[in-house]
Amino acid sequence: DTVPTKDQFRQMMQALLADRFKLIVHREMQEIPVYALVVGKNGTKLKDSAPDASPSARIGPRGNSRNYQVTMTKATMADLIDVIDNSGFLDRPVHDKTGLTGTDGVNLTYSPDLRSNRETEPDPNDVSLFLALQDQLGLRLEQQKTMVEIYVVDHVDRPSRN
């Protein structure tokens, strides 16, 4: 009667896929290109969250402009990376290499790399995610390669009937 944790949900999903699709996978390590989120050479511009701040987040278009606004009152680096990864605007995953712990207030405004933005005249207010992270938060995305665990599908069938 309770909401499952992320790990419990993953186990339920794995059991469902194994049952319905006879899915068999194995894990292996593979080197892939990633973006490493690192602290810029002049240090971070993040401000510590107030101790009594409650976690909240607003992510989406900013007013009538084509810029996106990310506002989080109490964010960890993992929270910020989730927002960046889930935006769908980067071609590879992001890994935290900042070494920062604790929670911070995050205010970030950037122009997503959408096809509709590329098809129109450049807007002087456009800011790439890379520059926004550097200028507004004192963080950088560096291209790197790293070993990650991946799942390899060994077998899958058409789903069974209900």
Image (cartoon, rainbow, N blue to C red):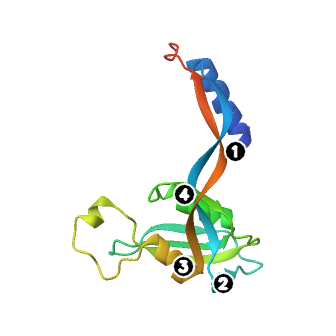
> Residue 63 in the image: x percent, y percent?
37, 75
When asked about the image quadrant of residue 67, the answer is bottom left
When asked about the image quadrant of residue 105, the answer is bottom right
Tell which circle, 2 or 1, labels the residue nearer the N-terminal end: 1
Near mark 2 (Cα within 10 A), the count class, few <14, some 14-19 or many ≥20, is few
In the image, what residue type sits under mark 3?
Gln
**On the image, numbered disc 1 is attached to which residue?**
6
Residue under the image location 65 percent in, 81 percent down: 46
Residue under the image location 66 percent in, 48 percent down: 147
**On the image, numbered disc 3 is attached to which residue?**
134
Q: Taking 24 as reference, is 87 left or right?
A: left
In the image, what residue type sits under mark 4?
Asp
Q: Is mark 1 on a helix, strand or loop?
A: helix
Q: What is the CA distance from the residue labelled 4 to the residue labelled 3?
A: 17 Å
Tell which circle, 1 or 3, labels the residue nearer the N-terminal end: 1
Q: What is the CA distance from the residue labelled 4 to the residue labelled 1?
A: 18 Å
Residue under the image location 67 percent in, 62 percent down: 78
Q: What is the CA distance from the residue labelled 3 to the residue labelled 2?
A: 10 Å
Q: Do the residues labelled 1 and 3 touch (CB within 8 Å)?
A: no
When asked about the image quadrant of residue 142, the answer is bottom right
